Image: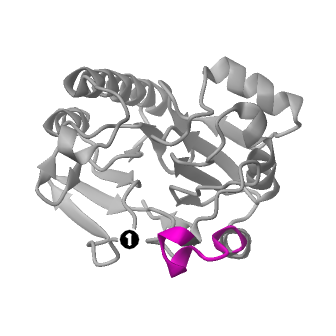
């Protein structure tokens, strides 16, 4: 029962948004995801998808993308990204998936999931510096970061309770990188460190293929898992 991760699928079956405008690597990216995922992942495995799953604006528009994800092997745990405009309450999303017979998808939001090897925790995260986050309206960045830290803290505390006395790690999955270049979101890092998280995976970053796959900051190993960085192949998470 292996763990895999891949962020930023950017599916668009219900919205017809081509991704190859973002570079040749994105050409036929959905076909690449399907073939490479299916060649690696088994029905007993779990795949974490931390954000930017679908370009859909509503759950109804996202139905075809959810059905595609459901058709792929394994259990899927989806986190929220900055482009997941279809995202609503977890109860509404679960009811919608049930209504369209999607059975292998769950949501990482103010909660955690225990597997035999690790406990999966996380939240969306955010950039605390305005210049690094292009938003259409004025945004209280520090307020958003504070809220995301609270959600991450709740997820990690839930994960600690699920872990109990077992000697397995908490692994964090964020959409936004807590550290990237000169940017450091200290509140997120502080939350990870306070819970002794040693592995954190993030997406959101595209086209930066010379970015180190993994680097260490304050004792936390940070790894990029954006789909285009991984050439649309889910990454095995080794504990």
Which image quadrant for residue 153? top left
Residue 136 vs 172, above or below: the answer is above
Residue in front for this viewpoint, 195 or 212: 212
Residue 128 vs 11, above or below: the answer is above
**How many numbered circles does the render carry?**
1
Residue 218 visible to the viewer: no
Residue in front for this viewpoint, 148 or 106: 148
Indicate left or right for 122 with 80 as reference: left
Looking at the picture, how far across and down is residue 159, in whole percent? Answer: 44, 31
Q: Is residue 22 magenta?
A: yes
Looking at the picture, how far across and down is residue 86, in whole percent? Answer: 63, 33
Residue at 28% across, 57% down:
222
Looking at the picture, how far across and down is residue 127, in whole percent? Answer: 25, 40
Residue at 38% across, 53% down:
202
Residue at 48% across, 69% down:
22
Residue 21 vs 14, above or below: the answer is below
Quadrant in which the N terminus is drawn: bottom right
Q: Residues within 10 Å of mark 1 (few under 14, many from 20)?
A: few
Indicate left or right for 22 with 29 as reference: left
Classified by dominant secondary structure, the portion drawn in magenta counts as helix
Label 1, on which residue?
207
Which image quadrant for residue 188? top left
Looking at the picture, how far across and down is residue 163, in whole percent? Answer: 45, 33
Which coloring applies here? one colour
Tell me the magenta residue range. 21-31
Could you tell me which secondary element the residue under label 1 belongs to?
A: loop
Residue 205 vs 186, above or below: the answer is below
Indicate left or right for 126 with 51 as reference: left
Residue at 58% across, 58% down:
9
Residue 6 visible to the viewer: yes
Q: Is residue 143 magenta?
A: no
């Amino acid at each position: 029962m292996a763990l895999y991760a891949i962020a930023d699928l950017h599916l668009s079956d219900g919205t017809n948004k081509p991704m190859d405008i973002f570079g040749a690597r994105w050409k036929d990216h959905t076909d690449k995801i399907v073939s490479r995922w299916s060649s690696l992942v088994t029905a007993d495995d779990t795949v974490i998808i931390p954000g930017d799953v679908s370009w859909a604006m509503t759950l109804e528009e996202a139905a075809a993308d959810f059905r595609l994800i459901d058709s792929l092997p394994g259990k899927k745990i989806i986190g929220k990204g900055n482009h997941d405009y279809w995202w609503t309450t977890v109860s509404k999303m679960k009811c919608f998936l049930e209504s369209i017979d999607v059975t292998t998808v769950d949501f990482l939001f103010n909660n955690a999931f225990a597997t035999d090897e690790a406990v999966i925790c996380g939240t969306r995260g955010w950039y605390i510096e305005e210049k690094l986050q292009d938003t259409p309206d004025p945004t209280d960045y520090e307020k958003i970061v504070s809220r995301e830290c609270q959600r991450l803290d709740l997820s990690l505390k839930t994960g600690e309770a699920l872990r109990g006395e077992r000697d397995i790690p908490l692994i964090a999955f964020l959409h936004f990188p807590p550290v990237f270049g000169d940017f450091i979101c200290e509140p997120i890092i502080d939350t990870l460190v306070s819970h002794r998280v040693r592995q954190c995976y993030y997406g959101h970053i595209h086209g930066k293929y010379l970015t180190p796959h993994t680097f260490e900051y304050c004792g936390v190993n940070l790894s990029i898992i954006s789909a285009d960085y991984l050439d649309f192949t889910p990454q095995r998470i080794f504990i």
